[in-house]
Image (cartoon, rainbow, N blue to C red):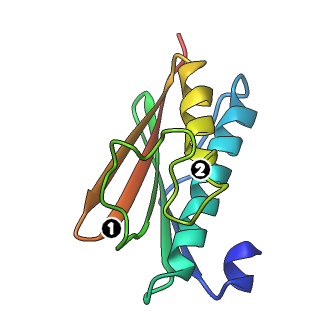
Amino acid sequence: MAAKQADVTLKFEMTEPIELATANLLTIIRIIGILLDNAIEQAVRETDKLVSCAFLQSEGLIEITIENTASQVKDIQAFSELGYSTKGAGRGTGLANVQDLIAKQTNLFLETQIENRKLRQTLMITEET
């Protein structure tokens, strides 16, 4: 709904059904929600207004990748620090919350890359042992 109201195209790719363990399902959904919200908020400020989300599953690993244009993002080192935001003061808690959520789980990892003005964040979910 947020993407539609903001006139942002939200593109999903999934080649096969993904099965998530229920043990940390709410945490995973919360993380995806924060990443998508951030991507949509940034896409509104860009000319292409596009957010892509891909779900891929391989042996023992699920990867959820969210990508959007982010022409103003330069420093991914500060990206997940509490209070860091490219969108103004009083913001910057979402990615810090994501880092806190991931730190509490043994099977979640987040990789953040910026390349050719594209911000790509990949949540990796390994099988729980």
Percent x, y of residue 70 = 39, 70
Query: Is 28 positioned to the left or the right of 2 in the image?
Result: left
Q: Amino acid at mark 1?
A: Lys
Q: Quadrant of the N terminus?
A: bottom right
> For the residue labelled by badge 1, is the local secondary structure a helix, a strand or a loop?
strand
Query: Is 100 positioned to the left or the right of 5 in the image?
Result: left
**Pointer 1 residue:** 118
> For the residue labelled by badge 2, is the local secondary structure a helix, a strand or a loop?
loop
Query: Is 78 positioned to the left or the right of 1 in the image?
Result: left
Residue ID at (51%, 81%): 45
Residue ID at (52%, 56%): 85
Tag in front: 1 or 2: 2
Percent x, y of residue 77 = 33, 42
Percent x, y of residue 28 = 64, 38
Residue ID at (37%, 70%): 72
The CA distance from mark 1 to mark 2 is: 19 Å
